[in-house]
Image (cartoon, rainbow, N blue to C red):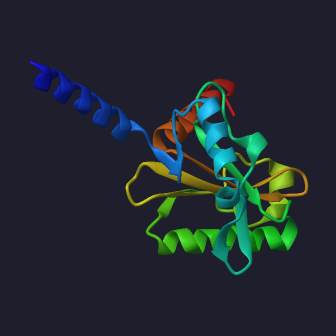
Amino acid sequence: MKRIAITIVLLLITITLSAQVQLYEGFYEGMTKKESKKELSQNKDKYSVIDFGKGVEWKIFKPGLGITDELYELHFLSSQGYVSGQNALVYLETTADVLKNMGYTVYLENENWKYPHYWAVKQYTHGLMLIDPKKTKIVHLYYSGTITIARMTIQSLKYTEQQLAESNNKEEVSGF
């Protein structure tokens, strides 16, 4: 009887762990705010410089962890601070190239994602979204703000689909 109970508990733990999407390294979708902060503080060096080559280095941006009650996305900024203009384009293109070489493919692409001057004027909601080879998470490369800063987020495919559906519903309701 004990073996059956232990087997059931182990099976439930395995199912629970496999259902979580690993966003990046030690960050998983659904982590609590406390768990996320602990992971970031215990591995500060690992998350402060994530090297993509060609001088492109990202870091997890602490205030932008994207946490409400649970972690649903990670926000990244340049490890050198805000990167804008032509440098932002180099950051985003280099990151996209590295990810594509790792097997990521285009999930959604704004035709003007490479042109920062459009972002400040048109306030796009998405840039280039790449999906990982396992089809579980999305890396979103885009510009942010009026000075068009390079940004990157990682979120689960499920969360991305929910956000896109909500965005489409708002457009349908507004009539635009």
Identified at 74% across, 42% down, the residue is: 64
Where residue 45 sits, quadrant-wise, is bottom right
- x, y percent for residue 91: 73, 70
Query: From the viewer's perspective, is residue 144 above or below residue 156?
Result: below
Residue 117 falls left or right of residue 112: right
Identified at 86% across, 52% down, the residue is: 121
Residue 22 falls left or right of residue 13: right
- x, y percent for residue 134: 37, 55
Quadrant of the image for the N terminus? top left
Residue furthest top in the image: 1
Question: Which is nearer the eye, 112 or 160?
Answer: 160
Query: From the viewer's perspective, is residue 25 above or below residue 97?
Result: above
- x, y percent for residue 13: 31, 32
- x, y percent for residue 21: 45, 43
Residue furthest right in the image: 147
Residue 158 falls left or right of residue 143: left
Identified at 17% across, 29% down, the residue is: 7
Q: How many labels does the image show?
A: 0
Where residue 53 sits, quadrant-wise, is bottom right
Identified at 50% across, 39% down, the residue is: 161
Residue 121 falls left or right of residue 39: right
Residue furthest front in the image: 2
